[in-house]
Image (cartoon, helix red, strand yellow):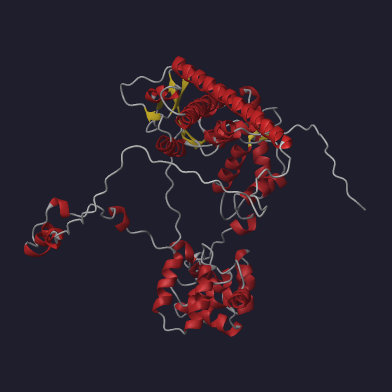
Amino acid sequence: MQQRINLNLRVAQKQVLTPGLVQMVSVLALNKLELRDMITAEMVENPVLEELADGEVETDTEEIARIEEIVAAETRGEQAADREVTEAHSEAHDAAQAAFEEYEAPSRLSTDGNGDGPAIEHTSSTLEGPLEVVDFTPAKEKDAFDEIDFGSFFDDYLDPGFRSPASEDVEKPSFENFLATPTNLTDHLMWQLSLSAAAPEVVVAAEAIIGNLSEDGYLTTTTIEDIAEAGGHSLELAEAALKLVQQFDPSGVAARDLRECLLIQLRTIGMERSCAWQVVHDFLPHVQNKQFKEIAKALGRPIPVVEDAVEYLKRLDPRPGQRYNKPEARLIEPDVFIVKNGDEYQIIMNEEDVPQLRLNLSYRRLLNRGESDKDVRTYIKDRYSSAIQLMKNIEQRKQTILRVCQTVVARQRDFLDRGIDELKPMMIKEVAEEVGVHPSTVSRAVANKYVHTPQGVYELRFFFSEAVQGPSGQDTSLLVLKRKVKKIIEEEDSTHPLTDDQITRMLQTQGIQVTRRTVAKYREDMRIPSTHQRRVKTRKVSM
């Protein structure tokens, strides 16, 4: 069966993001530090962009519009020229095709009288013009004595205490290369492994174990069987490598769960077969529920002894890897300042250390056809278009953030005046409708950006939260609700902690209508233990 090839036309709508729109979206999502780095990189790549120095005047909007007109006119001219060249090529191709079709006769090569082949016509030509005289005199040999560098000889050998500035090595390594970097958990364990006297195959398996440890120092991402199979080791060899790594500092590293981590630490300090060892080995889930009476009955020990053992276990480190994997300090600079001026709040963009851009107009003359060739004009045209688009996107970012902050100030006036307990619920969709943009635009405008307020420095996304409906019809933010739940639990009597029902009734008296299940959910989200786990038993002291 022979297949047929057909041409079909189909009309479809497709949304395509232009490079300018892509850049606008990416610029909007940048915070101040990221924007500064991006502008610096653009100034390096684009010669028509330059930083506005103190006392200089920004590029006039009329001048920018005039450059845009020149760029547009140059683009139209190039397109018209390309069309003319294309038409000329097409006409030449048609003429050549017509000539070729007319010339489909046999070869017109003439043969000699015998018909053995084409006749070759010999022509002679004469050379005209002056002749160039070539000098064949052999070049003079260089003297080897002239090639000796006496300056470096004197600097290196005769006077070691003095070196001329010309002989100094200017390509010296940066001083930053000698700054010490903090040692992480992997480096610390690899250093100890290099000092061990283990067999080479055990070292290879131990390196695989160290590479699969989590930030807390646990071997939970993979199993010892997987490490043995991936490295081609036997299970006994992988177990020996694991025991080797578990002997390293910090104590408890390379454990597969919390129970093994605590047992390794107890073994290191020689507390095997102690009460604390037995509690961890057999009754660790009971410790979480504070079932000390059941533990004491099973071990045949007094309850105070079990409680002392649990108190000692609290001194151990459940996350030994965090000692060497501490998170680095994060540098935060507010993107916006909200300052109270009289009875009104003023919004100020933090543009300190952010380069202010202007156009270098000295390249404008290269856009003229008489000043440069086509390639130079195309390059300058693209650079000017890219620079103008970047300046517009930066200004668009500024205006969008300002409008969003104006809406935040209008809706969160009570928070700015009295504090976090007055925070009102606010959704991104509501702010987007008020500003007149898409919700994704508001989401990018508040992403990774911080605002300095009279109540402190907060992330802009902090002001957006869901609401809990109260009986009085007013909304309460979920952040405020969690804060109130946490505050009630912190102020409770530890010997008689409050239940979730009691907390619910206390919130209802404050005008917040919630259910017990909601309070339990928020309590678990904040990792607050249950009522039974929060209860602290007091010991009776006999006289």
Q: Report which quarter residue 256 is drawn in.
A: bottom right
Give residue 504's position: percent from left, percent from top.
68, 43
Q: Is residue 101 left or right of residue 384?
A: right
Residue drawn at the location 83% of the way across and 38% of the way down: 7
Give residue 182's position: percent from left, percent from top.
38, 60
Q: Residue furthest right?
A: 1
Give residue 251's position: percent from left, percent from top.
46, 72
Q: Is residue 223 left or right of residue 455?
A: right
**As displayed, is residue 441 above or below residue 172?**
above
Q: Residue furthest top?
A: 62
Residue drawn at the location 53% of the way across and 65% of the way down: 540
Tell which of 86 and 333 is nearer to you: 86
**As displayed, is residue 260 above or below residue 488?**
below
Tell which of 19 and 427 is nearer to you: 19
Q: Is residue 535 left or right of residue 253?
A: right
Q: Report which quarter residue 141 is drawn in.
A: bottom left
Tell which of 189 and 503 is nearer to you: 189
